Amino acid sequence: MAVATELMEKNEIQRDITEMVRNFVDKEILPNAEHYDHEDSFPGPIVEQMKELGLFGVTIPEEYGGMGLDLTTYAMIVEELSRGWISISGVVNTHFIGSYLLMKFGTDEQKQYFLPRMATGEMRAAFSLSEPEVGSDVQGIKAVATKEGEDWVLNGQKMWVTNGLLSSVVFVLMKNDPKADPPYKGMTCFITEKVPGESENTGKFAGLVIPPKIKKMGYKGVESTELVYDGYRCPPDRILGGEEAGLGQGFRQMMDALEVGRVNVAARGVGIAQRALELALRYSQERKAFGKPIGQHQAIQFKLADMATKVEAARLLTFKAARMKDAGQRSDVEAGMAKLFASETGKEVVEEAFRIHGGYGYSKEYEIERLYRDAPLLLIGEGTSEIQRMVIGRKLLERHKL
């Protein structure tokens, strides 16, 4: 007789690390998130503790000083961090994608140089695709890389770079051949180093300027910036994978990384939805109306039932996509589905929690107000819901071609 396996079952390592992260979130993030959100200031002390906990090296192999854990475990960690504050998960998100790019496509020298310092959080990473006039249409980027002597010279403006100012290294997509047809064949990923915190780099990193951070509705604390490359010189050994193997491969590399990035965003959607559900459950038992707690009214119970069901479904989709990727299976459709459903669930569950809080939900005295401003980011980041639907539909037709 076959024995059913619990879909949400965690192994011992996953149980220990998620419990550790949840305790960290409850003690250090939730009590302080409102302060950093209000001030729109970088949560430096929290990030330092994350370094001590090893959270910047979760997926980096042990040989480079990391934990060597899989994408599924990382998604569980991201859910817990996002339950506390999605800005904190944003601090590790682009860093995680940078380490993934290095692990999968980097040369041995690139791995040896970057990964040990990235594992400790000493060096934090960002990655950049978007430009002021280019978002979803990545092949339409205008930033260019031109070979001058031994070096490649980078010129162009990038947009919406999370960790753009405080990172030490940026994985940036440039056009090395603007005339390539199709355009994606003429795109390359460059590993560009910079001085963290410097708005205008000089010396060997001259030619990279970071304008003042973009002011946002939510997702505060972690900086989102533009990057202006103006004559930045990049040696050929800083092309991801090396010049011989990596030139013209940037689009393919970045799209591969976005597949795991979408699992990451899905986990963030689950985390913020889980927190909104917790707040709604608590408030509906504390707040009284018509002589009894509002949670005893059927209208509120129906909301809670739908919210909890969506959270559970989003979590299952997210872990399925992560586990398929860990197993080496093709998971582009599943990652897109997880990102689509979990990001929409994050927005919907937060809004229902906001409604349950009534007028108090509109007050900055209540945590739900911050969640209400943060949740919409997930609908846009790493591919809008419309783009996800387009990708899912196209891939489904490819898989089931007549």
Image (cartoon, grey):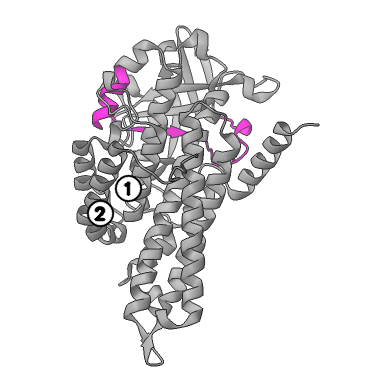
Measuring from the top left, give residue 319's x and y in whole percent: 46, 42
Stretch in magenta: 113-142
Tell me which residue sits at (40%, 64%) in the image.
277
Q: Which residue position holds label 1? A: 88
Give the residue drawn at x 29%, y 27%: 118
Residue 371 sits in quarter: bottom left
> How far across and how far down the image is residue 219, in percent?
39, 53
The residue at 37%/38% (across/down) is 74
Evaluate if marks 2 and 1 touch, with contact meaning CB atoms under 8 Å apart.
yes
Query: Toward which corner of the image does residue 63 lie, by quadrant?
Result: top left
Q: Which residue is mark 2?
A: 29
Q: Position of residue 142 (x, y in %)?
A: 59, 30
Work out which quarter of the rendered image holds the C terminus and state it: top right
Q: Nearer the viewer, residue 217 or 344?
A: 344
Helix, strand or loop at mark 2: helix
Q: Is residue 344 above or below residue 282?
A: above
Q: Amino acid at mark 1?
A: Ile
x, y percent for residue 392: 65, 41
Asked whether residue 186 is in view, the answer is yes
Q: Which element carries disc 1, helix, strand or loop?
A: helix
Above or below, 357 against 311 in this view is: below
Dot 1 surroundings within 10 Å: few (below 14), some, or many (20 or more)?
many
Is 131 contained in the magenta span?
yes
